[in-house]
């Protein structure tokens, strides 16, 4: 998923050990350092481990949700 979304410029961020740390989705910024927000990704309502490891499949619904950390 990650490569496809970067290619069409839907997501942007910083490269990390586990793939891209997504900071921007469709122009909207989530900045954990500034306001404790981050992008959560769900696939058909279930949380994923990240865009790098998420496989795109017909019939599945994917969502990016700007989330505030409780930590």
Image (cartoon, rainbow, N blue to C red):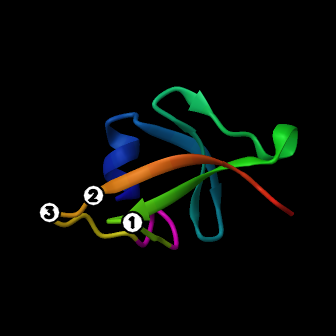
Residue under pointer 2: 61
Which picture quadrant has residue 31?
Answer: top right
The residue most toward the top is: 27
* Picture mark count: 3
Quadrant in which the C terminus is drawn = bottom right
What is the crowding at mark 1: few (fewer than 14 residues within 10 Å), some, or many (at least 20)? Answer: few
Q: What type of secondary structure mainly makes up the magenta span?
A: loop
Q: Secondary structure at mark 1?
A: loop
Front residue of 65 and 32: 65
> What residue do we see at 52% from left, 26% from top?
27
What is the crowding at mark 3: few (fewer than 14 residues within 10 Å), some, or many (at least 20)? Answer: few
Residue under pointer 3: 59
The first of marks 2 and 1 along the sequence is 1
Mark 2 touching mark 1, by CB under 8 A? yes
The magenta segment is 49-53
Residue under pointer 1: 45
> What residue do we see at 32% from left, 65% from top?
44
> What residue do we see at 34% from left, 59% from top?
1
């Amino acid at each position: 998923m990650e490569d496809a979304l970067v290619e069409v410029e839907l997501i942007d961020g910083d490269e990390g050990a586990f793939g891209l740390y997504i900071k921007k989705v469709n122009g909207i910024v989530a900045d954990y350092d500034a306001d404790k927000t981050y992008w959560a990704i769900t696939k058909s309502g279930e949380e994923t481990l990240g865009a790098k490891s998420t496989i795109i499949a017909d019939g599945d619904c994917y969502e990016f949700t700007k989330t505030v950390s409780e930590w």
